[in-house]
Image: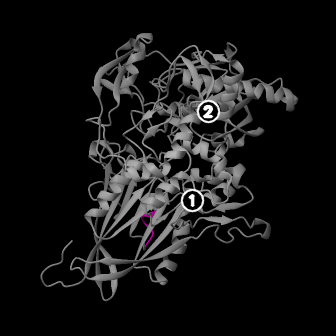
Amino acid sequence: MEGTMNDQRPRLQLRILETTDIHANVMDYDYYKDAPAADLGLVRTASLVKQARDEVPNTLLVDNGDLIQGTPLGTYVAKIDPLMKLEDAVHPVYLAMNEMDYDIATFGNHEFNYGLEFLDRMIRGARFPYVNANIYVDESQDHREFGKNKYTPYTILNKTCRDTNGDMHELRIGVIGLVTPQIMEWDQAHLQGQVVTRDMTDTAMEFIPQMKKEGADIIIALAHTGFDSSDDGRQGAENAVLSLSKVPGIDAITFSHTHKVFPAVDFSRLDPKFKDKQGQPLPEVDDVKGKIHGVAAVQAGYGGGHLGGIDLFLVQHEGQWSVEDSQSWNRAVYDVEQRKALVDADAGIMARVQQAHEATVKYANGPIGMTSAPIFSYFALVQDDPSIQIVTNAQTWYTEKYIANSLPQYQELPILSVGSPFKAGRNGPSEYTDVEAGPIAIKSASDLYLYDNLLKAVKVKGEIVKEWLEMSAGIYHTIDPSRKEEQPLLNPLFSVYNFDVIDGITYQIDITQPPKYSPEGELLNKDASRILNLRYQGEPLNPDQEFIVVMNNYRAFGGGQFPRIQEAELVLDSADENRQILMDYIIEQGQINPRADHNWSLAPIPGNQAIVTFTTSPEAVKYLEAFPHIQFTGKLDAKGFGIFSLNL
């Protein structure tokens, strides 16, 4: 931004470039499909970085976390690759990032999935600093709530910048790192007794003034957290960007965690989390300038599919730099509407990670069994589904054996198994499971179970099972049977990985009734009830009957804010991963039949006049012959999802 003719104050533009939630998608390759993928990969984002750097003289490249976990490459490097056991080993993501010349980074929650020892060893391979301010060494034995910081809480980068007249200036850029404090719940097994976390906003309130006193001209918060207005002001909030934007002294925020894109490429693609009930941006959200509560902010999606940017226009007055204006933006590597790549992969980055990539492809294609039927997740949100069924079957199989051998006191209790659709379009229309009938490889098991979760089981009563299902049923909008126009079924504010299916019982969901809980687990209507005909072995479920419910550590330790689960007694605290259990089950069975047992369904709508629609991948049409109650409307939405109708 240029000054007026009479305003001779120095001005400069600083461009902050953000990558985030790469999730080990270094190559532009889908290991689950064993095929190239033009819509993701840090090797393609790197080309956007080069373009963005060429456009302006002053840039800062940052990463916002969730780097090392999320694809078979992440699993291979962390658990299989013998080279990673060497002290001087460099993780492939850091080979790529070092080549791209990053300036600084912070941690995401998934960095802790493999434990602190592995993480601390891996980040030694990064040729750029890491900052995090709200993870502390656990010194509770000394009766201290917060001891010393586990990592460097912030740093001040001295950067030589060129102003609009070509003159050079030393700019002191303060950078603080923050991560959602829920890592203590989700990775309890790795972190308990070693570290503790603190509320992100409280942490920022403490450190930002220190950074100012130490001479920071501007301050950037790298915050691995998302946007959720319902979390504003909540102590220990998971998604705290709105609260952070109100902390005095923060000039820009790079955020992440929820895999959203902000600001959106166009308004039709802006996620509903940023909108009110009328579909307009919330008062705190400026999707045009890319600001939250007046503070420049950017979120760059998932998997390297976007490069986020914040252009800060700075002016110097009496020796002090301040933000005069800003513009945030996102650039995609792929055009969803035209279905074409917008940039090529960077050949130099590809060469750096080629060896690890080829080893991963070989590992991922290792055979483990056969399936007599295809396994897909296209309809997992509207009917019982084979991609969930195979997971719940494997969990039950493991738990039955474990209890028989090690916990005989629980042998008389029935086992229920919880599964949810991890790949049901969260990151776009290409993110669905689709395993053909025939051989099953390791990549298929990784496709079915994305996360490095550990199996857990709790003892609960039937009344909690009912509330659990009521929370899960919040994924649906309330359908009005009397309306004849199209009514979308799925609530986009509800995360697909929180749609829990519970096998071992039977039930129906009445979508004409209002939800009992919000997507955040808050009670909306204590008298609401969507769950019908809830039965165990054909008999109505007794609220006082006890069950063993098997799930993953994320849900067992509070992930998703499901009501009353944390009241439950933890009876099986396994160190075995759900994904490995799935692979072991397939290996033992040799050939599996993953067909869904249809233990749950959406209840029929009286009169059958309502036109209920939902979105999924357009690829789902190849399976429609088996489901006459589902039809493709022939339409796509703004994000490239197919719109389907459901006859209830």
Q: How many marks?
A: 2
Q: Are marks 1 and 2 in contact (CB under 8 Å)?
A: no
Q: Is 526 situated left or right of 80 in this image? A: left
Q: Residue furthest bottom?
A: 318
Residue type beneath disc 2: Glu
Magenta segment boundaries in residue numbering: 244-248
Q: Tell me what residue is drawn at x 73 percent, y 24 percent.
A: 397
Q: Is residue 261 visible?
A: no
| Displayed quadrant of residue 415 | top right
Instruction: Label the magenta part by its dominant secondary structure.
Output: loop
Label 1 residue SS: loop
| Percent of width and height locating residue 287 | 30, 54
Give the residue at mark 1. 235
| Percent of width and height locating residue 207 | 53, 74
| Percent of width and height locating residue 430 | 41, 33
Q: Quick one: 344 or 393, which is closer to the camera?
A: 344
Q: Tell me what residue is drawn at x 67 percent, y 47 percent.
A: 82
Q: Is residue 408 above or below residue 648?
A: below
- The image quadrant where one finds the C terminus is top left
Q: Tell me what residue is drawn at x 67 percent, y 55 percent.
A: 86
Cα–Cα span, label 1 and label 2: 25 Å
Q: Is 610 situated left or right of 552 in this image? A: left
Sequence-wise, which precedes: disc 1 or disc 2? 1
Q: Is residue 459 above or below residue 289?
A: above
Q: Tell me what residue is drawn at x 63 percent, y 42 percent.
A: 554
Q: Quick one: 74 or 114, which is closer to the camera?
A: 74
Name the mark on residue 467.
Answer: 2
Magenta-span inclusion, residue 339: no
| Percent of width and height locating residue 9 | 23, 84
- The image quadrant where one finds the N terminus is bottom left
